[in-house]
Amino acid sequence: MRREAGAERGRREKARRLPVGGGILDGMTTLKARLQDDLTTAIKARDELRSSTLRLTLSAIQKEEVAGKAARELSDAEVEKVIAREAKKRREAADAFEQGGRNDSAERERAEGEVLADYLPKQLTDDELEQLVAAAVAEAKGAGAEGPKAMGAVMKIVNPKVAGRAEGGRVAAVVKKLLAG
C-alpha cells in the first residue's frame, strides 16, 4: 500500500513538471526548430564544428528574442536575418584571420560559415542579380530618376526583390555599375 502511494505521488509530480500540450518545440518557428533538431543530431554524432556553430547561432537567436522591452518569439524571416548576420560575421572573421596570418582559424571560420549557409536561401548568381537590378534601373528611369543620384530609388526597388539572397554591398556595387554605364 505504501509503495503504491509513493509511485502515484511520483507520477503526479512528473505530470506537474511536464509542459501541457506538447514538447520542447511548441511555439517555435520551423527554422529555429530545425536548428534545434540539427544541434541534437550533431551532438549525437559528436560533430564538434557543427554543434558549436549551431549552439552559437541559437544563442544569438535567443539573445535577439529577449532584446527590447519584452521577450518575443522570432518569425522565420527574423531568424533567417540572425543566421545571415552570423554568417557574415564568420566571413569577416575569416578574412581578418587570413590577413593576420592565422590560416587555421580562418579555415575554421569558413567551415562555420558553410554550416550556416545550409540554413540560408540560395544566393543569387551575378547574372540573376544583374537582371533584377537592370529591371529596377529601367523602372526608376521611367519614374524620372537618372544617373548616380538615382541610386536610392533603385535600391528601394531592388532590396525587397533580393531580400536575403544577396548582400547589400554586392547589390550596391551592381547598381552603381549599371547607373554609371
Image (cartoon, grey):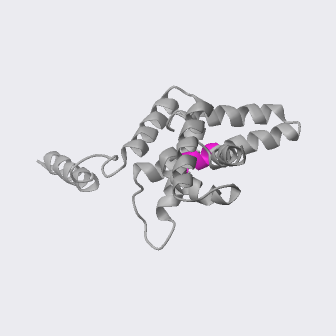
Q: Residue furthest right?
A: 101
Asked whether residue 84 is drawn in magenta, I would say yes
143, 47: nearer the viewer: 143
Q: Residue at x 50, y 47 (%)?
A: 163
Q: Position of residue 172 (x, y in %)?
A: 66, 49
Is there any visible trace of residue 116 in the rendered image?
no
Q: Quadrant of residue 114?
A: top right
Q: Quadrant of the C terminus?
A: top right
Q: Position of residue 130 (x, y in %)?
A: 60, 37
Q: Quadrant of residue 91?
A: top right
Magenta stretch, residue numbers:
82-87
Asked whether residue 152 is drawn in magenta, I would say no
Q: Is residue 156 above or below residue 48?
A: below
Is there any visible trace of residue 42 in the rendered image?
yes
Q: Main secondary structure of the magenta part?
A: helix
152, 50: nearer the viewer: 152
Q: Is residue 155 above or below residue 102?
A: below
93, 35: nearer the viewer: 93
Residue 38 in the figure: left or right of residue 52:
left
Q: Residue at x 27, y 51 (%)?
A: 18
